[in-house]
Amino acid sequence: MTKRMTEKRRIKMVFEYLGGNYVGWQVQPNGISVQEVVEKALATIVNHSGRVTASGRTDAGVHAICQPAHADVETNAGDGEILHGMNALLPNDIVAREVVTVSDEWHARYSAKEKTYRYTIFNAPLRSAFNFGRVWHVKTPLDADAMREAARCFIGEHDFTSFRSAGCAAKHAVRQITRLEIVKEGDNLNVYITANGFLKQMVRNIVGTLVEVGRGKEPVAFVKEAMEAKDRKKAGPCAPPEGLCLVDVKYEN
């Protein structure tokens, strides 16, 4: 049997993971990251080290159903072999869902056009063991209609300075939100946010602000006032990371 030639190419990968055991996607000195685990598994299969670049960072404790990434590899292993090989090496809380060869111009981050996050609030008097680590448990009843009314203020292109956390490296705070929907499913309130980009902890800061309205601690107008202030201290608190999940990333092609 003829051995396949070693081929240099770019591959797109899509990962699903639970973020509870990791310091986030990006490699950091203070703990194990998803990126570090993924790069180690890929290096074992292709027999060389390399950077795996994702569509964006997720913070410590944040999950992903769809986290696209790319890597440049030099190997005779096919896409299917890489996919199955990685899943044999990855821990149970990280799964590779797809591996496909793409053009060298395709970039997991810079080719992305919009992203969708889902934030899940478990709104019930008692916590749920089955939801542990995947939701924000809010005991007090939330007024979902008031939250929906307040959420309309976020739709469109705005300066989100009041909703970016300290240390955000983005050059500017203007982003466009095309969808902010609050869907009630049993005791869960799922907040879906789609935008052309996100600032550091932007989704969690938006959700924390909406919950203040839902609790009745702030009026609906609080959101507009916080937005116009362009001051992080004028908005609501940052929601905890465990309720947040990256669910979709759209690309032009």
Image (cartoon, grey):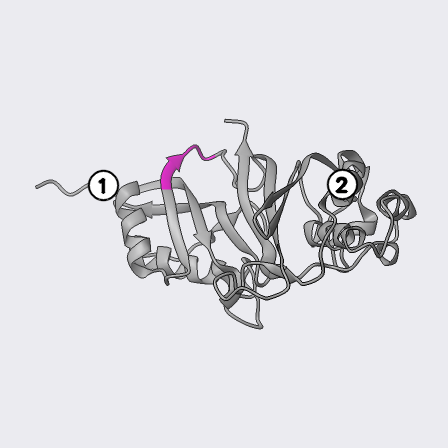
Mark 2: which amino acid?
Answer: Ala
Q: Residues within 10 Å of mark 1 (few under 14, many from 20)?
A: few
Relative to 142, 23 lies left or right: left
The vertical placement of 214 against 241, above or below, is: above
Q: Quadrant of residue 133?
A: bottom right
Label 2, label 1: how far apart the Cα atoms are: 55 Å
Q: Quadrant of residue 101?
A: top left
- Residue 135 locus on image (x, y percent): 58, 58
Report the front residue among 232 and 131: 131
Mark 1: which amino acid?
Answer: Met
- Residue tagged 2: 151
Residue at 35% x, 41% y is 8
The vertical placement of 192 against 123, above or below, is: above
Specify the segment rendered in magenta. 99-104
Report the front residue among 164 and 143: 143
- Residue tagged 1: 5
Q: Is residue 75 magenta?
A: no
Residue at 84% x, 55% y is 232
